Image (cartoon, coloured by chain):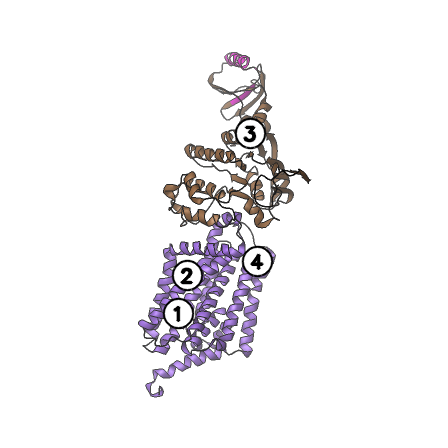
Chain colours: A purple, B brown
Amino acid sequence: MKHAGTLAKIRMRLALRSKAFLFFSVILPLGFLFFYAGVFGHGDPRKVAYVLAQVLSLTVMGSFWGLSAQLVIFREQGILRRFRLAPVGAAAMLASSVMSNYVLVLPTVVMEFLIAHWVFGMTQWGNLLGAFVIVSLGGITFSALGLIVASVTNNMQETQVINNAVWFCFLFMSGAAIPLPILPSFIQRVALFLPATYLVTGLQSVLVRHASLLNVTADVIALAGSFAVAFVISWQLFRWEPEERLPGRAKLWAAAAMIPFLLLGAWESTRGDRRAEANTIFESLQPLANPSQTK
Amino acid sequence: MEAAVERGDFRWQQSLGYDDNLVVSDTAIQVEDLVKSYGPVQALRGVSFEVCEGEVFGLLGPNGAGKTTTVEILEGLRTADTGRVTVCGLDPHRSGAEYQHLFGAALQSTALPDKLRVDEALALFSSFYPKRRDTAELVRRFGLEEKRRAYYSQLSGGQKQRLALALALVNEPRVVFLDEPTAGLDPQVRREIYDIIEELRQEKKTILLTTHYIEEAERLCDRVAIIDHGKVIALGTPRELKERSAGTTRIQVRLAQPAHDGALERLEGVADCRQFEDSYVLHSRRPPQTIVALVKHLEAEGNELQSLEIATPTLEDVFIELTGRRLRD
C-alpha cells in the first residue's frame, strides 16, 4: 500500500500538469452543472438537488476514463516496463490509479455542491454522509471498471473505442444525462444491469429525499460489489508489456466481469425497488411545478 | 569469515558486509543453457556464462544476436523457454521483491512520463527500496543539477540516458544490468557514460552490459562474451580474445580493381583474408613480407593500391574471424 500511495501522489501531480485533465475533470463537469441547473433547476431547490445528483454522477463516472486509461499509454510507451524492474506489483500500480482518481475527483464534487448552494439556491444539503459514501464508492468503482478496459485493450485507440461505447451506455441509460423515468421502459429495465444506475439513484435518494444509508443499501452494495469484482479482475488481467497478449484465461476473466452485473440486474428486476425509487423521486418534483399542489 | 559452503554450482564465501540474508559468492551471475524463441524465431540457442562478483562483463554482438533477451531474462522481464539463471543465488521469477532489491538496471530504451521531473523520478524510484542512495548525490554525480527540475520530455538523449543510469543506482544495487547504455549517443556523451561505468567498477559493482561497440567492450569490460545468432561463440578477457588472432597484424587495403579470387590469401605471411565492400582485411603473421608481396602482386597484375592501414587486431577482428561478418553488418 505504501508504494501505491507514493505512486498515487506522483500520478496526481502528473494529472494536474495536464491541461486535458483540468478540462475533462474540472471545467467540463462544472459546465454540466451550470447547464443542467440553469436549464432544469428553475430556481427550485429540490430540482437543483436532483440535477446536482445527476452532475455528481457524471463527475464521478469520469473516473472511468481518468488515470485508468493513462495506464494504457504507460504500457504503450514502455513506461510500465521501467516500473516492473522495481519492486512495484501490479496491485500497487492499479491501486494508485484508483486512489489518485478518487482524490482528484473530490475537489470538483465539493465545488459542485458549493455552486449548487450559492449560485443556484440549493437550500438543503441532503444526507451529506450518504452522498460522501456514494461518491466515494462510485469514484473507486468507475476507476476499477476503467482498469478492466485498460487491461483488455492493446492500445489507446482500442481503449477509446471501448471506453466511448461503455461510457455512452452509462451516460444515457443510467439516468445520469436524462432522468431514468422519462426514458423508454425497456431502457429502464436495461439500466438495472448498469452500475452507473445505482450511483445515480443512490445520489438522488440521499440528496433529494435525504435518505439514510440504510435506505440506499442496494446502491451501496451494488457499487461496493462492482468495485471489488472490477478491481480483482483488472488485477488478473494486468499486463506490463505492450506485446504481451491476453491469454485465453484472461478473456474468461473479462467475461466473468459481466456476471455480477447480470445477477444484480436480475435481482433488481424481480425483487428490487430502485426503478420505483427513481420514479418516486422524479414524480415528487413534479407537483412543485404547480403552485396549487405545493401546500 | 564464514567457511565456504558448497551449494550447487556456487562456492559461497564470506559476507562482505551486505546486511541482507544474501551470501556473497564469487559467482554473481550464472546463466545456464538459456533457450528462448519468439514464435518461429529462435532468439537464444543455449547461452551460458558466469559473471564474477565485482566484474564488468560484456555481451558483445550485433543487433538481434540475443543480448537484450538474455539481459531481460536476468531482469525478470522475460522467461526463458528452458535453461536457468541466478543472480547472487536468487532466481528472478521465484525470489520476488528480494531479487528486485538486489539489482539495478537501465533498459535499452528507458521511458518515463513526459511531465515527470528529474528529481521526482529519482525520489519516486528510490522510495520503492529499503536501501537507498542519496538522490541529491546522484543528481550531482550524473551532472543533472541544472536539469533537476526539468520535465523528462525536456531532456536531451544523453541526459535521459544519464537519468536512466542514475535510476539504476537508487537502491545501491550489488548487480547492475546496462543494456546498450551508449547506443545512439554522440561520442562526447558516450565518453561521459564510460567514466560513470569506470566509477561503478571502482565501487566493485558487478556489471553486465550489452553493447555492439567494440571500443566499449575493450575499454570497459574485464571479460567479454561474443554472442551471435543466440549463441556465445567466444568468451574471455579482451586480451585473451584478441590473442586468438595470435601474432597477427591487421592490414586493411583498398585496391583500384578487385583482386583475383584467393590471390591475396596466398601472399606471404597471410593467415586470413576477407573482403568487405570496397576493402580487404588481411591478417598477417609477417607484416613486412606481406606488404612487399602485396605491392609486387599488384604491380604484376596492373592493379593499384589506394589505401593501406596497419593495426593490431581488435575484438572486431575476432568477431570477423569467427563469423565472417562485421559487428555492424
Residue under numbered circle 2 = A104
Residue B155 drawn above or below residue A64: above
Q: Secondary structure at mark 4?
A: helix
Amino acid type of the residue tagged 4 in the rendering: Gln
Amino acid type of the residue tagged 3 in the rendering: Arg
Judged by its main secondary structure, the magenta piece is helix
Whether residue B260 appears in magenta in the rendering, the answer is no
Q: Label 2 to label 4, Cα distance in Å?
A: 26 Å
Residue under numbered circle 4 = A236
Whether residue B285 appears in magenta in the rendering, the answer is yes
Q: Secondary structure at mark 2?
A: helix
Amino acid type of the residue tagged 1 in the rendering: Val
Residue under numbered circle 1 = A55
Please check whether the numbered discs 1 and 2 fall on a single chain.
yes
Q: Label 3 to label 4, Cα distance in Å?
A: 46 Å
Q: Is residue A17 left or right of residue A265?
A: left
Q: Label 1 to label 2, Cα distance in Å?
A: 16 Å
- Chain for numbered disc 3: B
Q: Secondary structure at mark 1?
A: helix
Q: Quadrant of residue A27?
A: bottom left
Amino acid type of the residue tagged 2 in the rendering: Leu
- Chain for numbered disc 2: A
Residues in magenta, as a range: B280-300
Q: Secondary structure at mark 3?
A: loop
> x, y (%) of residue B64?
55, 38
Q: Label 3 to label 1, Cα distance in Å?
A: 67 Å
Q: Quadrant of residue B84?
A: top right
Residue under numbered circle 3 = B325
Name the residue nearer the viewer: A141 or B325. Answer: A141
Q: Label 4 to label 1, Cα distance in Å?
A: 32 Å
> x, y (%) of residue A95?
50, 59
